[in-house]
């Protein structure tokens, strides 16, 4: 654990104060299921878990965002405006020799307005905090799932594939694998699936479902696990149709590939995005205008001379992250020193868990965290 | 028993135990269990300073990691499940050729749209939106499952720990799919489950495993050397046959056969002698060699089975000594 000098603590405090963020003392111990349910099974092996006497698995907090949002929910109306400062140890088992207990500092903000200024301010504060603590300038990378979603919608992507591609966004290898599969029309048995698809082609979904139900019935397969027959039938048809077409429209896939390749300084990327958008008949539409506003706001908010870059494929593969994401790293270092993004879905999910709100409800929220141990290592 | 014996953990019951005993017996080592099945300690007849601990297969994996036993017989599946990075704790010395079983991923047969991991990835991504929860995977192989799902880029799932009758979980509704071990697949069949085309996560069998974290005293090392020497001698002999024949120019014929069958793994351990030739060769080429010898003028060729071949060097023991040295022991 690094030693935090009085100066550093004072610097953090003044950063928090300048941001108008109130320091909250969060518990260290939470139900492990909370993180596993929201972040995914893979977080479990990173958690430090101990069993409580009642059998519930308890975990040391691996991060601040979820605890801060829980704090927010338990202290009043979900959609009220708030700005929280978090500082202290978080606990995560890490693959390399990095210690499992390390310190982070961050700011989580909730604001029902949630405009581009909201996003820009968060980036600017992260930059300011990293620079003040390390006396080192970081490079900021930004990306936006919203732009990718707009493109998929404009290309007429079927709903299921839109959801899956959005779900893979942030992990380029998974996304590429999925796109390759769309190009090839799936990997197995084109023949049989395609044949059945032709038989069922043009039939009403209801009829297709009944046909599949009958098939399963004949085979004596009544148990379907946790899925409905309708769901199985629908996906079967979707897969068969893809195979029958022998893949997705090549032109559309080429457009997606061209989009994902866009990256560079803000100016370069913006002009590349505009040229792309013009050439393809305005598929990005409103989302591009919004991105431009956001990038302008960020440029205006960060200290002069801050290095900013955009990557069309940059994101975080986490359910509750809803669009805009950013990351700070030092030149020549692969691991980020700070990361943040919009998580408009998280408060709704948490409120639903504790019975205080509706699942789908989006509450604009953004946060960032600075990996303090990485800052000092670079000194 | 002396002060720091070599401790070997062997399965305490069932077919694994029988096969383990047979394995040691082939090497001329008998696992003695005075007092019968109730006793949890035994010894190896014929070698001093060896203690046998009778444990369950999954305990053996854990004890090997902890270093409380030196050697153990257990399945590769359990080693890979209980040890995050097996290579830093243990050495899988010998595959034993029994206890074959695959760790597989199986889904309800009714999922006609799911044939492989890609399909499963799609379903996993669709589930939260459709059903309000993640794909639930029942298994006792938590670490193997995580690693396998990660390698396929699947993150939308949740493991439901299941310590028995895992294959029943989809039917009872406690999970959607399973990761489990199977040797024949009949239990899966009975539960209307099918293995995904690329759903074999690990092909496992029983292994003789050495702990790198145990206290390798002089006595323990010396006992290990003797055991590995016998095991190796038996292994080396198991599939080899000794071919003998008389010939008026035995030295020349012996040399010629060795040249012709060079790539088949033939050897002349006693050199090329006049009047009488004696060769060692893998079982599968014995007949071909016998035919060739007669063509070259041998009147009679006899072939016999070998019990042991003791060589000057013992690669298994050398390998193990190197591993211990690398591990700083």
Image (cartoon, helix red, strand yellow):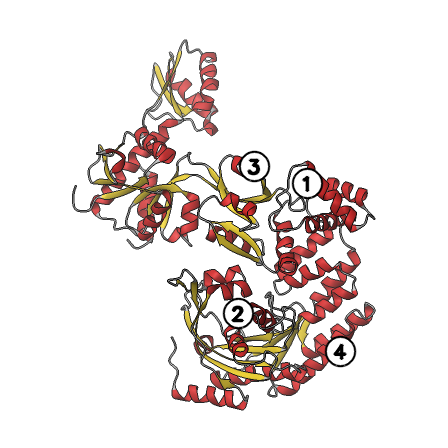
- Whether tag 3 and tag 2 are in contact, CB under 8 A, the answer is no
- Whether tag 3 and tag 1 are in contact, CB under 8 A, the answer is no
> Mark 4 — residue?
A289
Q: Chain of mark 4?
A: A
Q: Pick the residue in front: B122 or B96.
A: B122
Label whose residue precedes the other's in the sequence (4 or 2): 4
Mark-to-mark CA distance, 3 and 2? 48 Å
> Mark 1 — residue?
A216
- Whether tag 4 and tag 3 are in contact, CB under 8 A, the answer is no
Whether labels 4 and 1 belong to a single chain: the reply is yes
User: In the image as oriented, which residue stretches furthest toward the front?
Assistant: A355
Label whose residue precedes the other's in the sequence (4 or 1): 1
Quadrant in the picture for residue A261: bottom right
Q: Give the side of residue B153 with respect to residue B233, left or right.
A: right
Whether labels 4 and 2 belong to a single chain: the reply is yes
Dot 4: what SS? helix
Q: Chain of mark 3?
A: B
> Mark 3 — residue?
B189
């Amino acid at each position: 654990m690094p030693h935090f000098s009085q100066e550093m603590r004072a610097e953090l405090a003044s950063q928090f104060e300048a941001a108008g963020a109130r320091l909250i003392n969060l518990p260290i111990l939470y139900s492990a299921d909370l993180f596993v349910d929201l972040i995914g099974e893979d977080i479990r092996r990173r958690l430090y878990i101990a069993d409580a006497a009642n059998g519930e698995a308890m975990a040391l907090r691996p991060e601040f965002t979820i605890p801060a949002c829980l704090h927010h929910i338990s202290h009043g109306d979900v959609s009220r405006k708030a700005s929280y400062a978090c500082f202290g140890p978080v606990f995560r088992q890490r693959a390399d020799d990095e210690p499992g207990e390390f310190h982070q500092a961050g700011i989580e903000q909730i604001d029902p307005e949630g405009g581009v200024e909201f996003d820009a301010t968060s980036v600017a504060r992260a930059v300011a905090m990293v620079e003040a603590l390390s006396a080192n300038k970081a490079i900021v990378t930004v990306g936006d799932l919203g732009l990718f979603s707009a493109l998929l919608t404009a290309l007429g992507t079927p709903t299921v594939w839109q959801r899956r591609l959005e779900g893979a966004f942030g992990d380029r290898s998974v996304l590429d694998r999925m796109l390759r599969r769309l190009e090839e029309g799936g990997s197995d048995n084109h023949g049989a699936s395609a044949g059945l698809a032709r038989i069922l082609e043009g039939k009403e979904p209801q009829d297709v479902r009944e046909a599949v139900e009958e098939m399963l019935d004949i085979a004596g397969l009544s148990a379907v696990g946790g899925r409905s027959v309708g769901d199985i039938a629908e996906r079967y048809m979707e897969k068969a149709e893809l195979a029958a077409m022998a893949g997705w429209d090549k032109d559309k896939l080429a457009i997606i590939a061209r989009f994902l390749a866009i990256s560079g300084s803000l100016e370069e990327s913006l002009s590349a995005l505009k040229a792309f958008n013009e050439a393809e008949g305005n598929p990005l539409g409103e989302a591009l205008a919004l991105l431009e506003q956001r990038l302008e706001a960020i440029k205006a908010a960060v200290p002069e001379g801050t290095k900013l870059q955009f990557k069309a494929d940059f994101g975080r593969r986490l359910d509750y992250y809803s669009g805009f994401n950013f990351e700070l790293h030092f030149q020549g270092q692969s691991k980020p020193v700070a990361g943040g993004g919009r998580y408009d879905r998280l408060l709704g999910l948490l409120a639903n868990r504790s019975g205080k709100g509706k699942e789908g409800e989006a509450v604009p929220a953004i946060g960032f965290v600075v990996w303090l141990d990485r800052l000092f290592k670079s000194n | 028993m002396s002060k720091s014996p070599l401790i070997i953990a062997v399965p305490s019951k069932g077919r694994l135990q029988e096969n383990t005993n047979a394995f040691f017996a082939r090497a001329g080592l008998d696992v003695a269990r005075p007092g019968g099945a109730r006793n949890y300690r035994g010894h190896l007849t014929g070698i001093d300073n060896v203690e046998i601990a009778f444990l369950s297969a999954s305990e053996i994996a854990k004890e090997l990691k902890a270093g409380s036993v030196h050697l153990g017989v257990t399945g590769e599946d359990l080693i890979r499940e209980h040890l995050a990075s097996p290579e830093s704790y243990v050495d899988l010395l010998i595959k034993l050729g029994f206890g074959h079983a695959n760790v597989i991923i199986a889904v309800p047969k009714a999922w006609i749209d799911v044939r492989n991991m890609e399909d499963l990835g799609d379903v996993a991504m669709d589930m939260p939106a459709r059903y309000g929860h993640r794909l639930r995977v029942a298994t006792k192989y938590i670490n193997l499952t995580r690693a396998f799902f990660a390698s396929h880029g699947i993150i939308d799932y949740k493991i439901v720990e299941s310590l028995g009758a895992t294959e029943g979980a989809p039917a009872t509704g406690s999970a959607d799919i399973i990761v489990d071990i199977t040797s024949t697949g009949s239990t899966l069949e009975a539960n209307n489950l099918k293995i995904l085309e690329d759903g074999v996560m690990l092909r496992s069998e029983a292994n003789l495993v050495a702990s790198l974290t145990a206290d390798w005293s002089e006595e323990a090392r010396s006992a290990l050397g003797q055991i590995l020497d016998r095991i190796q001698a038996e292994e080396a002999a198991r599939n080899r046959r000794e071919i003998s024949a008389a010939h008026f120019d035995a030295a020349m014929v012996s040399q010629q056969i060795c040249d012709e069958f060079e790539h088949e793994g033939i050897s002349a351990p006693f050199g090329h002698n006049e009047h009488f030739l004696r060769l060692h060769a893998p079982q599968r080429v014995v007949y071909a060699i016998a035919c060739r010898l007669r063509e070259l003028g041998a009147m009679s060729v006899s072939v016999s089975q070998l019990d042991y071949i003791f060589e000057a060097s013992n690669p298994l023991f050398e390998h193990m000594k190197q591993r211990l040295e690398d591990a700083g022991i």
